[in-house]
Amino acid sequence: MSSKSPRRSIGDLSEGTLGLLMLLPAILLLCLIVVYPVGRLMYISLFDWRMSLPNAVPAFVGLEHYIYALTDDPKFWDAVYNTVLITIITVPGALVVGLGLALVANLPFKHRWPTRLALLLPWALPLVFAGLIFRWFFNYDYGLVNDILQRLGFGKVLWGTDPNLAFFTICLVIIWKSSSFMAMILLAGLQTIPRNLYEAAKVDGATSWQCFWKITLPMLIPSMVVALVFRTITAIQTFDIPYAMTGGGPGGTTETLAMYIHKTTIDFLDFGYGSALAMLMFLVSLGATTIYLRIIQGDKE
Amino acid sequence: MSAAPAAVATHGEAEIKINRLWLFAAGAAVVVNGMFPALWVLLTSLKTEGELTRVPISYLPQDPTFQNYLTAFAAQPLARFFFNSVVVAGLSTVLTLLVSAFAAYAIARLRIRWKNVILSAIVAVSMFPLISLMVPLFQTMRALGLLNTYLALILPYVVLNLPVCILILVSFFSAIPRDLENAAMIDGCTRLGALFRVVLPLTAPGVFTAGIISFVNAWDEFLLALSFTSSMQMRTLPVGITLYQGEFAFPWPIISAALIVAIVPIAVVIVIFQERVVSGLTAGGVKG
C-alpha cells in the first residue's frame, strides 16, 4: 500500500481539484457578499451620487469626497474621535473585567452552571437589548442608578443630557457586554494551563500572587492577543449600543463612525459621500485585520 | 474539594472557612454582574405602567401582572419576529457550518498550493466591516430581488461567521490522525464520506462551538436586519423590539416583557450547552 491515497478509482478527483471544489462555496459567497460590493463601493465613492436628487445623473467627482472628509468635515473627525476613544477605553476595559470574570469562573465551585450562565448571558444578549436595558437603568426619573444615588444621599444625575456622562455610560455598557466574550476566550486559555506548573511553584514556596504574575498571565498572553484583536475590529464598528442608548446625542457627541456612515447613506441618502466614508473605515479595519493575520501566522511557525 | 490532608493541617479550619467565603463572594459578584440586568427586566415586565412611574421606585412588583406579555404579543407581531429570528439564525448557522467545514477540510487536509495564502485571504475578506458595505450590499440584494427575504440576511450572516468558524474547524481537523480517515477510505468511503462519517463526528466539540458562536452572532445582528427588511412580517427580534417605542413614549413594561420572551429561550440553550461552548474554545480553536 502506498502512503498516499489508499483508494483511487477512476471516479475520484485529484486532491487539487477536490480542494478547489470544497473551497468554492466560501469563495463564491465572499465574492457575492464582499468582493463585488467592495468594488461597487469604491466606484460609487468617486461619484456625486445622491438619492435625494432622484433624477440627477451621478457626476464623477474623483477623490473629492475623500479630500472633503479628511480636510473639511468636522463631523467626520468628531465621529472618528468618538470611535477611537470608545476603542481605547472599552477594549482594555473589557480585557481587565473579562480577565477578572474568567479567573472567578475558573475557581473550583461545586456547581459551575451559575457562573457559566452569568458569563455567557451578556454575550448572547443582542447589543441593542443591552443598550435598551441600560438606557432604562440610567433613566433620569425612574432609573435604578439615580434611585440608588438618591437613597445614598446623593442627587440625581442627568446621564442622558450631559455629553461626557452619556459617553461614559455608553463605554460602561460596551465593557459590560463585551467583557463576557473576552472572559470566555480567557477561560478557555486558563483551562489549557497545565496544573503541575502551579503545583511545582507551590512546592518552591510561591504565593498565589506570584503564581498569577509568573504563570497565569504569561501563559494567557496568546489568548489575550486573539481576544484583543477580535475586540478591536468590532470596536471600530461600534453602532448598536450608542444607537439604542443615545441615538448619537446629545448633539452628535456620542456619534460613532458607523453611525455617521449610516446617517449619511440611509437618512440623508448621500450614497457617494457615504461610500467614501465607508472606504475610509475599511482601511482602518484592514490595518487591524493585518495585525491579526500576522499573529495567527506567527503562531503557526 | 480534594485538598490533600497535608494542606488541611497547614491551613487550619478557620482559613478554609475564610477561603470558602471569598469563593462564594467572588462567584456571587460574577453572577450578579451577568444576570442582574436580565433579572431587573423580568421584574419590570411584571409591573404596571403606573407602578413604574412611582417615586421612589419599587424594586419588587407590588401587584405582579402578566398583562404586559399579552400586550407585547398584541401590539406587535412578536411571535413572528421570534420565528424569523429562529429561521435566520438557524439556517445561517447550518449553512455557515457546511461552507466552513468544506473550506476548513480542504485547507487542513488536502494537498493544495497556497494554503496559507487562501486561509489568510478568506479570513481577511470576511472580516471586512459589513456596516461599511451597506449601500452596495443593499443594491446587490435589490438587484437579486432578495430584499425582505430571509436570504438577504442569511448570506451576509454566513460571511460574518466564516472567519471564526473556519479557524476553529481548521485547528480541530488538523488534530485528527490521518490514519482514521485512511482506514475509512480503505473500507470504501469517499473523501466526502470520510469527512461526514469520520472527521465531523470526531470533531463534534469544535463543530458545536463554531455552531453556537454563529447562532448567537446571527441572533444578535441588528444593522443589516434593520436595513434589508422593511416589511413587518420579516423583522427579526432585535429590530422588532425597537419598534415598541414611539416617538416620545417608551412603554418599558411592554418592552421588558418582549425582551424576556426573547432572552429566556437563549438562556435555556446556554444552560444546557454551557460546558461545551467553553471546552470547544479550549480544545484549540482560540489560538487559530
Image (cartoon, rainbow, N blue to C red):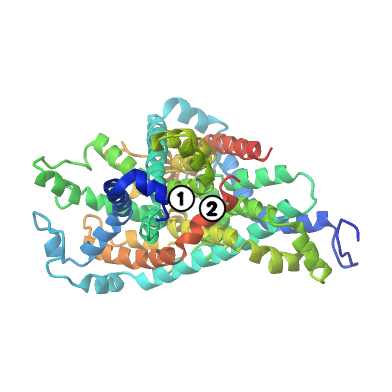
Q: Where is residue A263 drawn, in percent x and y?
A: 40, 44
Image point (26%, 71%), residue name: B69
Please state, as top left, top right, bottom left or bottom right, where the N terminus of chain A lies in the image.
bottom right
Q: Which residue, given by chain and number where applicable, does mark 2 sit on?
A: B281
Q: Please say whether residue A179 is visible from this viewpoint.
A: no
Q: Please say whether residue B281 is visible from this viewpoint.
A: yes
- Whether tag 2 and tag 1 are in contact, CB under 8 A, the answer is yes
Please state, as top left, top right, bottom left or bottom right, where the C terminus of chain A lies in the image.
top right
Q: Where is residue B47 drawn, in percent x and y?
A: 17, 66
> What kind of element bears circle 1?
helix
| Kind of residue indicated by mark 1 | Met
Image point (81%, 71%), residue name: B187
Is B29 or A234 nearer to us in this picture?
B29
Image point (42%, 55%), residue name: B2
| Kind of residue indicated by mark 2 | Leu
Q: Around disc 1, counting alpha carbons within 10 Å, would you say few (fewer than 14), some (14 to 19), or many (20 or more)?
A: many
| Chain of the residue under label 2 | B
Is B132 or B48 nearer to us in this picture?
B48
* Residue A184: numbered disc: 1
| Chain of the residue under label 1 | A
